[in-house]
Amino acid sequence: MKQEFSNSWISSSQIRKQRKYRANAPLHIKGKFLSAHLSKELRKVHGIRSARIRKGDEVKVMIGKFKGKIGKVGAVDTRKQRVAIDGIQNKKKDGTKINAFFNASNLMITNLVTDDKKRFKRKNVKSETKKEEAKKAPKEKSKNQGLKENKEAKDKNAPEKNSNK
């Protein structure tokens, strides 16, 4: 089996291929796998449904043994695609505590770190206004439509030939 990452791979219903895609993906794509849903309040404020998890974000565990627990993200492991939350730990048999790691899809972001201004960069106001104007303005005909209409107009203006002579 090839170990390389394929950009042409779109999707497969076979779970082995899905696992292989995730395992062999480069880090910039693995980072996209580390996104979680936003709470309803954050959705309204930012206008998006999900965002990448970052260290310092406050998250709520939605599925699993720690369901309902809330804490700050302590570490994000992009290579292994997992997230550690401060204050949520497992006990080992010898009594030592270790961080419990979570899949990002099982978390919901309740509070975001907004120190980085590029994280939720708003779209340009100019591009939004252009889109709105384009919707309001009547649609112009494409070049091909114009050519077809010109040919039809010429055919109508041309004198009709009588075949009854």
Image (cartoon, rainbow, N blue to C red):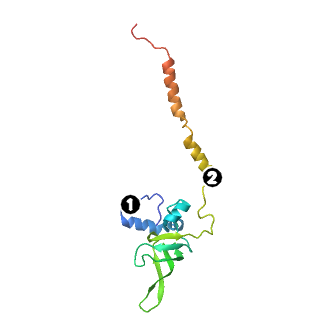
Mark sitting on residue 82: none
Q: Earlier in the sequence, mark 2 or mark 1?
A: 1
- What SS does tag 1 mark? loop
Point out the residue furthest to the bottom here. Answer: 94
For the C terminus, the image quarter is top left
Whether 76 is drawn above or below 43: the answer is: below
Q: What residue is shown at x 50% (from left), y 69% (from top)?
A: 109
Q: Position of residue 106 (x, y in %)?
A: 44, 71
Residue indicated by mark 2:
125
For the N terminus, give its image quadrant.
bottom left
Q: Is disc 1 surrounded by few (<14), some (14 to 19) or many (20+) residues within 10 Å?
A: few
Type of amino acid under label 2: Val
Residue 161 can be seen in this image: yes
Q: Secondary structure at mark 2?
A: helix
Residue at 45% from the left image edge and 67% from the top image edge:
22
Of residues 15 and 93, which is closer to you in this image? 93
Residue sitting nearer the eye, 27 or 119: 119
Percent x, y for residue 34? 50, 68
Residue 12: give its label.
1
* 25, above or below 162, in the image: below
Percent position (x, y) of residue 47?
A: 53, 59
Give the residue type at disc 1. Answer: Ser
Task: Pinpoint residue 4: horizontal percent, then vertical percent.
Answer: 47, 65
Q: Residue at x 59, y 43 (%)?
A: 133
Task: Give the mark toward the camera: 2 or 1.
Answer: 2
